[in-house]
């Protein structure tokens, strides 16, 4: 595999792997950030126009290098090809057909670099009736059925409300970026053995559907019920729910197993509730109303002191700033502060080849000159290319 660039700290399990990213938004940049955290030399090809606007550093570009090229200029195209020729993998996140129109489609790339693994990140996939339609995370997740899992059933007192899902987490990052990373790593391993690359078609709808494998398995086994009133995951059971507290904060309980449910009841002083009747859904509404009133009677801190760290399966709902300051998160170093800005630390952890330490992220075009020098261009060549608008 290609040597990693010399001015970067070597380390991480992917040291020596070069990945070219065509700049985009959302899951593609996140996937390449994960690979950069793991030691890959990730070079982002960005637009000269964006570099001229002075786009600053972004944490999503941490560990990467940025080169700004005009892909409508022959010299910019030539430099992009030099990078692709030197790479082990490529990431692009455009609509189907865009890379082909730019001249960098999979067939063209394979003709020059047959061992390269070509990662394609889209919402709907490379084919299908919706392939070329616009969309975002909220749409992709909805189509897979995952959003329906967040529907709260209507009751006589509470009308049905639209389901809510966390922005970008389930679709863009979970169903998209994580499956792109998995595909690229598998493709790189296979290419190392065969000497041949391939295309990785990572679609958010595909990955999000895969994330629901456990739900579909339970449904097939008859332990998942499509009727929300009888499904303990559907905000109807008293033991798998989020509750409001007296200070307008929230807590969660997830005591699914009998022994954890029994402990939850014991710690809440509900000695009159029979633990063995946990899955009698007829009793859920009354007990849920009782727990709603109980949790609402005290502030979040009270319930944390009473339940956190026990087998009652409890956690408070924390804001972004609060989460980073929680003792467990601090003890594990899950967040880091770089130049006064907070970032999540790299994950997962490795015993022998630890990931790179996070940095502030590459600014648009920050490494153009250094990368072009590596490709064999002299300073006078680079000056000419810059003056001609081929790079910045």
Image: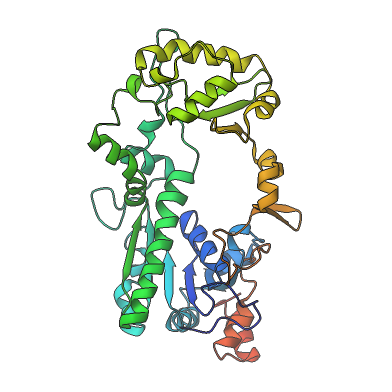
Q: From the viewer's perspective, is 131 left or right of 310?
A: left
Rendering colour mode = rainbow
Q: Quadrant of the C terminus?
A: bottom right
Pick whichever, 288 or 345, lies toward us: 288
User: Which of the 4 quarters of the picture holds residue 33?
Assistant: bottom right
Pick whichever, 345 or 369, lies toward us: 345
Pick whichever, 42 or 226, lies toward us: 226
Residue lying at 33% horizontally and 21% vertically, measured from the top left: 230
Residue lying at 29% horizontally and 52% vertically, measured from the top left: 131
Q: Position of residue 217 (x, y in %)?
A: 28, 41
Q: Residue furthest top?
A: 156
Q: Position of residue 42 (x, y in %)?
A: 53, 72
Residue lying at 29% horizontally and 75% vertically, measured from the top left: 107
Q: From the viewer's perspective, is 166 left or right of 233?
A: right
Q: Quadrant of the N terminus?
A: bottom left
Q: From the viewer's perspective, is 172 left or right of 335?
A: left
Q: From the viewer's perspective, is 90 left or right of 320?
A: left
Residue 117 visible at all: no
User: Which of the 4 quarters of the picture holds residue 298?
Assistant: top right
In the image, is residue 268 above or below residue 27? above
Q: Position of residue 356 (x, y in %)?
A: 62, 68
Residue 90 visible at all: yes
Pick whichever, 218 or 323, lies toward us: 218
Q: Position of residue 313 (x, y in %)?
A: 53, 33
In the image, is residue 392 above or below residue 232? below
Q: Residue furthest right?
A: 340
Q: How many marks?
A: 0
């Amino acid at each position: 595999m290609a040597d990693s660039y010399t001015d970067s700290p070597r380390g991480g399990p992917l040291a020596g792997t070069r990945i070219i990213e065509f700049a985009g938004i959302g899951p593609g940049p996140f996937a390449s950030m994960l690979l950069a955290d793991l030691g890959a030399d990730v070079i982002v090809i960005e637009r000269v126009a964006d570099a001229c606007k002075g786009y600053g550093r972004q944490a999503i570009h941490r560990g990467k290098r940025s080169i700004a090229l005009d892909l409508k200029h022959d010299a910019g195209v030539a430099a992009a090809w030099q990078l692709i020729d030197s790479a082990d993998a490529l990431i692009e996140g455009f609509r189907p057909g865009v890379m082909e129109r730019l001249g960098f489609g999979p067939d063209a790339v394979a003709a020059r670099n047959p061992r390269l693994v070509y990662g394609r990140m889209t919402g709907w996939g490379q084919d299908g009736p919706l392939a070329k339609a616009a969309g975002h995370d909220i749409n992709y997740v909805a189509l897979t059925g995952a959003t329906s899992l967040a529907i709260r059933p209507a009751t006589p007192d509470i009308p049905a409300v639209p389901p809510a899902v966390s922005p970008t987490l389930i679709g863009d990052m979970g169903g998209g970026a994580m499956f792109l990373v998995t595909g690229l790593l598998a493709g790189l391993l296979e290419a190392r053995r065969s000497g041949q690359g391939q295309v990785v078609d990572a679609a958010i709808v595909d990955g999000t559907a895969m994330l629901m494998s456990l739900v579909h398995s339970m449904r097939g086994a008859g332990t998942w019920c499509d009727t929300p009133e009888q499904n303990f995951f559907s905000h109807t059971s008293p033991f798998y729910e989020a509750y409001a507290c007296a200070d307008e904060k929230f807590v969660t309980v997830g005591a699914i197993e009998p022994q954890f449910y029994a402990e939850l009841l014991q710690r809440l002083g509900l000695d009159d509730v029979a633990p063995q009747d946990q899955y009698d859904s007829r009793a859920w509404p009354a007990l849920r109303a009782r727990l709603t009133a109980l949790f609402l009677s005290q502030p979040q801190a009270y319930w944390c002191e009473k339940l956190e760290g026990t087998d009652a399966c409890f956690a408070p709902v924390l804001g972004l700033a609060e989460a980073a300051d929680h003792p467990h998160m601090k003890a594990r170093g899950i967040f880091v502060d770089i130049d006064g800005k907070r970032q999540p630390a790299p994950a997962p952890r490795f015993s022998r080849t630890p990931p790179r330490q996070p940095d502030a992220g590459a600014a648009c075009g920050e490494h153009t000159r250094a990368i072009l020098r590596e490709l064999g261009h002299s300073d006078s060549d680079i000056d000419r290319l810059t003056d001609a608008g081929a790079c910045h």
